[in-house]
Amino acid sequence: MVREQISVFDIFKIGIGPSSSHTLGPWRAAQQFIQLLQQKQALPLVVQIKILLYGSLAKTGKGHGTDIAILLGLSGDDPVTFEVDQVGPKTEKIRTANKLMLAGKKGIDFFINDDLLFLFNESLPFHPNAVTFQAFLSNETAISETFYSIGGGFVVKEGSGGQQRAEVDLPFPIETANNLLHWCIKTGLKISEVVMENELAWRSEKETLTGVLNIFNAMAACIYRGCHTSGNLPGGLNVARRAASLNRRLIGSNTYNNYDEWVAAIRKTGNGFQNTLDWVSCFALAVNEENASFGRVVTAPTNGAAGVVPAVLQYFIVFCDGYTSERIVQFLLTASEIGSIFKKGATLSAAMGGCQAEIGVSSAMAAAGLTECLGGTQRQVLMAAEIAMEHHLGLTCDPIGGLVQIPCIERNTMGAIKAITASQLALQTNPDNAKVSLDAVVKTMWQTALDMNSKYKETADGGLAVNIPLSLPEC
């Protein structure tokens, strides 16, 4: 049987906001379609491109920047390296010039209102997030492919069977939390150590360590940038950014010039309960305000939930003396495995499972990472993840205006605080007395997702999205 194999770098991806499923996924799908055209040596023959967006990609695509991501992906730009301040200017140039340079090489006429279609009332059966690319060639033939953005930046091409990469021989194959616990008990390894052994099947330890620290550096840069950027978020809701003003108020007279000095300055503000709570909220707000502004973030495991893991990791660094490379890697490896278990047993897609699949999973991941780093046993780590998700079950995804702003940004603060609380509870509890297992919660989350009404699955057709009387400008 073919099993899904997920690396730490599948769960944590550097990209551009505001959505992993609606921005990063379609961007990657566009890149894959361009690669397919190049493999078929068809790129020079293309005279027209049409893009069809279905389901949730259609209904909330405008607010999530799906159209922008696809234009940049078709242009040959990469979300890891593309300069975020050029997102607006480049896409506006495509719109006004009615020209699209495929892969930066082949120019075609492109009329966005005619060639990029939002099919609001159509959906494909495999997944709500579907996009079809059609390339019409000068020899009067056409190439068409459909891709599904299945959450967390994962993309599946129709007919591919869902495989992301070729299988490798993992020393510790893991599908469930029980599998993970089995290997920990058998080997005596911590969860992070089991994960590292599996990562070695793909690359060297040095490459993995470097990659994980790059992920952390991107998270840290995002938090720092978000804590020092003011103004209103784009999209028409006129949501004011709060992290910068909160940072100024909390930091007081302490001075600094860079991230490391900032960490030291935060420590000087004290570690009282309210102060710590405010800082955790500040960290989470900072990330998701950056995400909503088409900033560079780390999918963790999604963009809409990108602030939870970084906020809890930053809490660990600042208030638990966790600022060492070894502890940071330990935190992120542990967290990634929890995300992987939810991906395999349920979903990371809000379009499939509501916000429990995003904030809930990210909170479980953060709780697990924190618990291992604070000395918890393997069972306590899994218990912390279970507690965090248990209290996110049924959380809906109902973004106002289809934007990843309300209630998404504040939900990251809630997910981070719940993760810390879950970790503290697990560390003070004998896991042998636990009544609910992590696997039971994963199963329950998926059953809840299947039962959830589609209007609460990232469609902006229900909940807050229809009960808040806000008017948005015409797109």
Image (cartoon, rainbow, N blue to C red):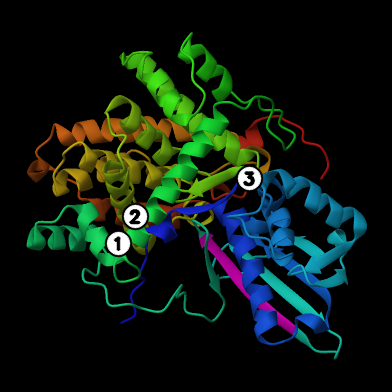
- Residue located at (46% from left, 35% from top): 412
How many residues crowd around disc 1 within 10 Å: few (fewer than 14), some, or many (20 or more)?
A: some
Task: Classify residue 371 as left or right of residue 103.
Answer: left
The C terminus sits in image quarter: top right
Query: What is the number of the mark on residue 205?
Result: 1
Magenta: predominant secondary structure element?
strand
Residue span colored magenta: 143-150
Q: In the image, which is nearer the foreground, mark 3 or mark 1?
A: 1
Q: In the image, which is nearer the foreground, mark 3 or mark 2?
A: 2
Q: Which x, y percent locates residue 163?
A: 45, 75
Q: Is residue 447 visible?
A: no
Query: What is the number of the mark on residue 460?
Result: 3
Asked if the residue under mark 1 is in contact with the one under mark 2, i.e. CB atoms within 8 Å, the reply is: yes
How many residues crowd around disc 2 within 10 Å: few (fewer than 14), some, or many (20 or more)?
A: some
Query: What is the number of the mark on residue 209?
Result: 2
Marks 3/2: CA distance?
Answer: 40 Å
Asked if the residue under mark 2 is in contact with the one under mark 3, i.e. CB atoms within 8 Å, the reply is: no
Q: Which x, y percent locates residue 96?
A: 90, 53
Mark 2: amino acid: Leu
Q: Secondary structure at mark 1?
A: helix
Q: Count of labels shown?
A: 3
- Residue located at (48% from left, 10% from top): 252
Q: Is residue 204 above or below residue 383?
A: below
Mark 3: amino acid: Ala
Marks 2/1: CA distance?
Answer: 6 Å
